[in-house]
Amino acid sequence: FTRERDSSSSSGSRLSELKPEPATLQANNISAWFGTHQVLDRVSLEMPAGVITSLIGPSGCGKSTFLRILNRMHELVPSAQLAGEVLIDGQDIYDPELRLTQARREIGMVFQKPNPFPAMSIYDNVVAGLALTGIKVSNDERDELVETSLIRAGLWKEVRDRLRSPGGGLSGGQQQRLCIARSLAVMPRVLLMDEPCSALDPTSTRVIEETMLELVNDVTIVIVTHNMQQAQRVSQQCAFFLASQGTPGAIVEYGDTEAMFDSPIDPRTYDYVNGRF
Ligand code: ADP
Ligand code: MG
């Protein structure tokens, strides 16, 4: 990553300027290819500010690809191509005028397998997120931000007495919350979560779900999940992706989560949410 702001322009860039504030993400007509293999076909979805949107659907239907497109990770794959646009509060994240670091700062990502830097301390793992902003902070401010981020990630009470211990010594669920804290350190406006609980036990899963429900007032959340109960517990809005018989992934149905589970419109949605495939 390059620095967002160099030191000459950072006067006035204070930590206090970083305020949590959710943004609306809008994907318009997203199509995606790996080489000649099309994996998404004209996917449009609004992910409103302060709402948890879940993306569901069978493996291989393009959910992870879609999520990665939402924060420009897709373009890291050399064979990847893209059509369509992604807007954050109306601003095109692929606009060459918008720095990649800015897009990544505003749109954080958490993965299926918790990936803290295992040998790095818990404290430094959180600070690692902050390094991306280029905003200069005093030691006191840094302490405060680490605490705030760990509180928001629901991990503070468990680790406050061992901030200098390695991140790799935490349990799986704690490691995942540490990754959430690392993402939150830059005050993202959107948090993308790709099956964040798939590697975790049910108790850790519930803790992370509670964390999400508390976070969503401050950050828009988009979660990919294979857990239908989880989708119903956490998300107000749900999109069902499907790639059937060699056709690229597309959204079959989306809308209010409760309505989608109680009275799906498309028979394929009905079959999927009822575990028929
Ligand atoms: P999901 O997350 O819904 O399981 P993915 O987005 O991971 O689906 O994959 C969608 C399709 O894109 C699959 O056919 C997969 O094989 C293909 N794909 C994903 N990543 C790559 C890649 N880096 N290179 C080539 N094909 C890929
Ligand atoms: Mg996936």
Image (cartoon, helix red, strand yellow):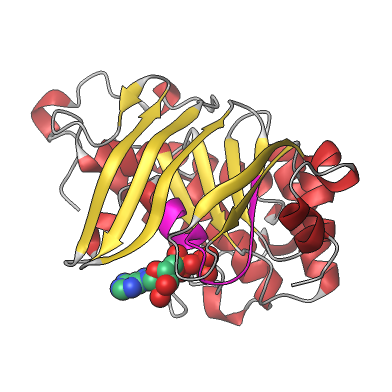
In depth, the one of 160 and 70 nearer the eye is 70
**Location of residue 214 by image quarter:** top right
Locate residue 77 relative to residue 159 in the image: left or right: left
Q: Is residue 227 left or right of residue 129?
A: right
| Spot occupied by residue 72 in the image (x, y as percentages of width and height) | 30, 49
**Residue 45 % position (x, y):** 52, 35
Answer yes or no: is residue 134 visible.
Answer: no
Query: Is residue 205 visible in this depiction of the protein?
Result: yes
Up the image or down, 104 lies above or below 193; here it is above
> Is residue 60 rendered magenta in the image?
yes
Bounds of the magenta span?
54-67
Q: Is residue 88 above or below residue 190?
A: above
Q: Residue at x 41, y 59 (%)?
A: 65
Residue 15 is inside the magenta segment = no
Image quadrant holding the C terminus, namely: bottom right
Question: In the picture shown, does residue 194 fall above or below 214?
Answer: below
Q: Where is residue 249? Give x, y as percent.
A: 48, 58
